Amino acid sequence: MHAITIDQPGGPEALVWAEAPDPVAGEGEVLVDVAASAVNRADLLQRQGFYDPPPGASPHPGLECSGRISAVGPGVSGWAVGDEVCALLSGGGYAQKVAVPAGQLLPVPAGVDLVTAAALPEVACTVWSNLFMVAHVRPGETVLVHGGSSGIGTMAIQLAKAVGATVAVTAGGPEKLARCKELGADVLIDYREQDFVAELKAATGGAGADVILDIIGAKYLARNVDALAVNGRLVVIGMQGGVKAELNLATLLAKRAAIAATTLRARPLREKAAIVAAVREHVWPLVEAARVKPVVHSVLPMQEAAEAHRLVESSTHVGKVLLAL
C-alpha cells in the first residue's frame, strides 16, 4: 500500500506519499480500506516530532478515518467485509489501509457520505467524552468553548445546544464568529479584540460559565478559572498556549470548582471502546436526525497532505480539513 510517511520530523514538506508495509488485522481488529482521513492538530505535532504514536500504533499520522472493511480478524463479531465505517485511531489514517480495533469502529451515519464521515470520529469522541462524561453538562448550564470555529469547537457548539445548554464561544474575527452563530452559539467573543472573561460575565449576569472546554492550556488557565461559575468545571484538552502556568488556588477553592485534563489517543482500548459506544448511542442519532452535522472546510487528495497541514496551520479554516483517496 501507500501511506504518508515521515522520515525526518519537520515542516509540511516532511510528509511524503510512499510505499509502506500493509497492515494486518490482528486479534479483535478489522482491516479498513481508507476512503478519507482528517487533519488534526495532533498530526501537526507528530510531523514536527513532538507527539509520537503510542507503542504498537501505526507510525503514519491520522487519528480518524472512514472506509470499507476489507478483512475481519479473529475474535471480531458484529462487523463484516464490505461494511462502510468510520473509526477512531491511534494513528495510521493517512494511508490506503489501516488496522482498527473493533471497539473503535462506528457505522457511517445515515445521511452522511463516506468521505464526510471521516470528519466525525475524533471530534465526536473528544467532545462527548469531555463535555458529558467528564464535565457532565446539563440542560440550562452555560458552556464556554474556546476555538469555536475549529473541528472540536463546531462539534461542541452543536452537542451542547442539543442538550439545552447556552453556548459561548471564542474565535478570531467576525467571519468565524458568524459561522459559530449559524451552528447555534449564543455568546460570540472575538478573542483578538475582547476580554473573554469580561464578555462572558457580562452575558451571564456575573455568574460565569458552568463548563469551559479549553484547547489553549497554560496561557488561559488563570483567566479560565476566573471565568468559571461556582461549582464550575474546566476541562483542558490542548496546549496551544503552553504547558506551565501559575494558579491562585484560593480562587478555585472559593468557587468550589474543578479542573480536569484529558487526552484521547493514549487511552487504553477499553476506555476508547466505552467512549465510542457512548458516541454511537448518544451522538449518532443526532447526526442521523441532522440536528448535529459534520462541518467540513475542504477536501484535499491524500497525496496533498502537506498542503492540508499548511491550511490547518494557517488557522483560516472552519471545521475539518479532510484527505480523500
Image (spheres, helix red, strand yellow):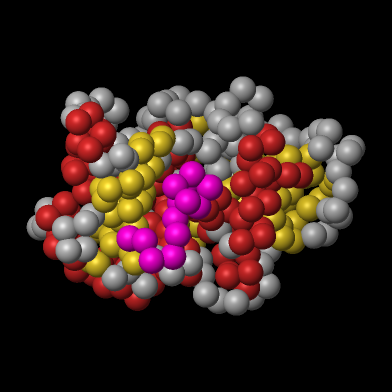
The answer to whether residue 225 shows anywhere in this view is yes
Residue 155, image quadrant: bottom left
Q: Is residue 39 left or right of residue 233?
A: right
Query: Is 265 located above or below residue 301 in the figure?
Result: above
**Residue drawn 16% across and 52% down?**
197
| Count of marks overlaid on the render | 0
Frontmost residue, 4 versus 46: 46
Q: Quadrant of the N terminus?
A: top right
Q: Is residue 121 left or right of residue 25?
A: left
Residue 60, image quadrant: top right
Query: Is 97 located above or below residue 119 in the figure?
Result: above
**Residue drawn 48% across and 67% down?**
163
Frontmost residue, 106 versus 196: 196
Does the segment drawn in magenta span residue 156? Answer: no
The answer to whether residue 113 shows anywhere in this view is no
Expressed as whole percent of the image width and height from the top left, the position of residue 305 reads 47, 47
Q: Which residues are magenta?
A: 129-142
Query: Is 30 located above or below residue 81 in the figure?
Result: above
Residue most toward the top? 55
**Residue drawn 55% across and 43% down?**
62
Frontmost residue, 207 versus 293: 207
Frontmost residue, 198 versus 118: 198
Expressed as whole percent of the image width and height from the top left, the position of residue 148 reads 33, 59
Expressed as whole percent of the image width and height from the top left, the position of residue 309 reads 40, 46
Expressed as whole percent of the image width and height from the top left, the position of residue 189 reads 19, 61
Q: Quadrant of the C terminus?
A: bottom right
**Residue drawn 68% across and 72% down?**
110
Query: Is 321 located above or below residue 129 in the figure?
Result: below
